[in-house]
Image (spheres, grey):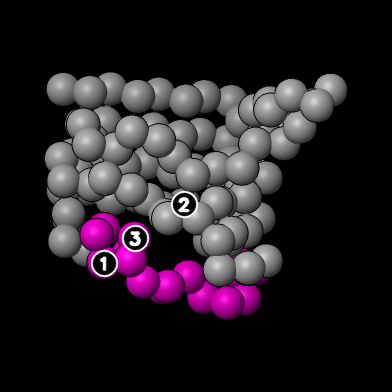
Amino acid sequence: MEEIITEDEEEQVNQLCTSSVVPSNQSRSINDDEVILPNLQILCLYELPKLKSLYKGRMTCGSIRRIQVDDCPRLKKLPFTLPLRNEQPSAPPALEIIRINQE
């Protein structure tokens, strides 16, 4: 999986967030609380006013380059696991931009 894009399809996104639809050959699960998406590069969420959560556990996305969230007022946090640098959480190495707009 290289990109997740959602546009005003709240019901489908809510179903995605509560069920496992990622093909097993494109993700690895360490346990029930963490999912690893090594090839996810871009995550965009648009106009999802009812979206509260993306995933209940933790997500490791080591290749993430861009995160964009527009008009998702109930979404308070993203479940990404941050790598440690000098024992402090830091941005994933490939991350170039995070853009968040609340309208």
Q: Looking at the image, is mark 2 or mark 3 earlier in the sequence?
A: 2
Q: In which quarter of the image is residue 25?
A: bottom right
Q: Nearer the viewer, mark 1 or mark 2?
A: 1
The residue at 42%/55% (across/down) is: 56
Q: Looking at the image, is mark 1 or mark 2 earlier in the sequence?
A: 2
The x, y position of residue 4, in whole percent, is 41, 52
Q: In which quarter of the image is residue 15?
A: bottom left
23, above or below 39, in the image: below
The x, y position of residue 60, in whole percent, is 62, 50
Q: Can residue 39 be seen in this view?
A: no
Q: In which quarter of the image is residue 11?
A: bottom left
Question: Does the magenta segment cover residue 96?
Answer: no
Q: Name the residue under label 1.
A: 15
Contact (CB < 8 A) between labels 2 and 3?
Answer: no
The residue at 33%/33% (across/down) is: 76
Q: How many discs appear?
A: 3
Question: Does the magenta segment cover residue 18?
Answer: yes
Q: Is mark 2 on a helix, strand or loop?
A: strand
Which segment did they paint magenta?
A: 13-29
How crowded pointer 3 is (Cα within 10 Å; few <14, some 14-19, many 20+) is rated as: some
14, above or below 80, in the image: below
User: How far apart are the two marked residues, 1 and 3, measured between alpha carbons?
Assistant: 5 Å
Q: Callout 1, which amino acid? A: Gln
- Could you say which disc has been placed on residue 17 in the image? 3
Q: Mark 2 points at which residue?
A: 3
User: Which quadrant: the C terminus?
Assistant: top left
Q: Callout 3, which amino acid? A: Cys
Contact (CB < 8 A) between labels 1 and 3?
Answer: yes
The x, y position of residue 7, in whole percent, is 22, 48
How crowded pointer 1 is (Cα within 10 Å; few <14, some 14-19, many 20+) is rated as: few
Q: What element carries label 1?
A: helix
How crowded pointer 2 is (Cα within 10 Å; few <14, some 14-19, many 20+) is rated as: few
